[in-house]
Image (cartoon, rainbow, N blue to C red):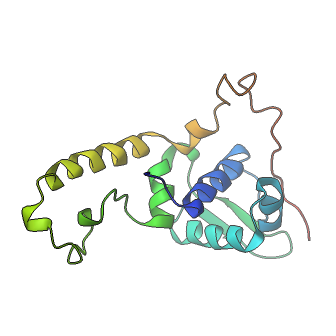
Amino acid sequence: MIKMSNLADYAVELMCCIALKPTAIHSSVGLSDTAHIPLPTVSKILGTMVRSGFLVSHRGLNGGFSLALCASEISISDIIEAVDGPVQLTNCLGEDTSDCDRISSCGTRSQWYRINEAVKNALGSVLLSQMIESVPDFIGDGKMDDLPLISKTLN
């Protein structure tokens, strides 16, 4: 099974929550409550997003987090790679391939590069702004109106 980490999944979800109200300042607690993600995990992800340049941290009593870039400037690949590192479907595609004793005789490695690039390009072609456009038709009426929006909370 090929799948991204839970942390990367949560990061995409949190960034979507923030992008729904891009001018608001979102608290960690508010995001945790709305997304139902444990506060320590939310804090870790938000710190990573700040260090990656996708969020701005606002200090003080009414502090929190807001987008540093427009949602149309952030790809899903950007978010995943900020949390998990480069998209890498097999161990032999990374920089440290010394743990594989089959590299010199592997007949499929070059094709895995093609597949890996296709996955990276697909993830890179989906923007955060597209993730929040609407809910797919099979889920409901296709509108985000019924989903809770996060606003600044004071604690």
Res 40 → quadrant: bottom right
Q: Residue at x 59, y 60 (%)?
A: 6
Q: Residue at x 63, y 53 (%)?
A: 15
Position of residue 81 measured from the top left corner of the image (x, y, whole percent)? 44, 61
Query: Would residue 103 be seen by someone viewing this image from the given angle?
Result: yes
Residue lying furthest left? 104
Query: Would residue 22 be seen by someone viewing this image from the given angle?
Result: no
Position of residue 131 measured from the top left corner of the image (x, y, whole percent)? 59, 39
Q: Decide if residue 44 is on the left or right side of residue 103.
A: right
Res 45 → quadrant: bottom right
Q: Decide if residue 107 is on the left or right side of residue 134.
A: left
How many callouts does the rendering have? 0
Placement of 130 over or under 5, stated as above or below: above
User: Quadrant where the C terminus lies?
Assistant: bottom right
Placement of 150 over or under 48, stated as above or below: above
Position of residue 64 measured from the top left corner of the image (x, y, whole percent)? 76, 67
Q: Residue at x 64, y 38 (%)?
A: 132
Q: Decide if residue 108 is on the left or right side of residue 149.
A: left
Q: Decide if residue 39 is on the left or right side of residue 7.
A: right
Q: Residue at x 57, y 46 (%)?
A: 71
Placement of 126 over or under 102, stated as above or below: above
